[in-house]
Image (tube, grey):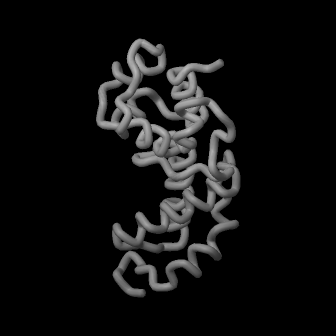
Amino acid sequence: METLGQRIFTARKARRLSQDTLAKGLGVSRQAVIYWEKDTNAPEAPRIALIADILGVRTDWLLTGKEPMHDSPELPPIPGEALDRGLLYRVLVALERYFVANGQDMEPEEKAETVLAVYEWAVAEGAPAEIDISRISSLLKLASPHRRAPNGNR
């Protein structure tokens, strides 16, 4: 039977979280997470629910190992979730190329919202190796019909 530490490790790996990321989300040191995973120490009782929440597992499963591991097939978002840096890079490059090619400019807030929307779209598409900007140009036009041209005109 798995131990509490093994279940923390398994759930952390399933979420693709580092020990550092989990520790920061919990407000503890990385060493504390290492000790928990090795069953050298155990987290305090009040922290168990927070660990389960961050790892997207049921508290009961974390404590006992009794199935099911999750309440639903969808995992909740991770506080401070690490982005797919490669995908984010591809999204940013594709969008910048699109803006340059179309002579468009945006306010920083609008650009940030557009980047997030396209990133979420790309994640939903399975994180494609290449971002085909032609596939999303109509999305961009619909999402923000009032983009500014470089001269400030709309």
The quarter of the rendered structure image containing the C terminus is bottom left
Residue 153: quadrant of the picture:
bottom left
Q: Residue at x 35, y 69 (%)?
A: 109
Residue 7: quadrant of the picture:
top right
Q: Residue at x 67, y 66 (%)?
A: 134
Q: Residue at x 52, y 28 (%)?
A: 8
User: Residue 20: x, y in percent?
Assistant: 39, 29
User: Residue 39: x, y in percent?
Assistant: 46, 15
The quarter of the rendered structure image containing the N terminus is top right
User: Residue 76: x, y in percent?
Assistant: 54, 52
Viewer-nearest residue: 13 or 67: 67
Viewer-nearest residue: 133 or 32: 32
Residue 126 drawn above or below residue 69: below
User: Residue 87: x, y in percent?
Assistant: 57, 47
Residue 154 drawn above or below residue 121: below
Viewer-nearest residue: 25 or 118: 25
Residue 108 drawn above or below residue 92: below
Is 63 on the left or on the right of 67, as rendered?
left
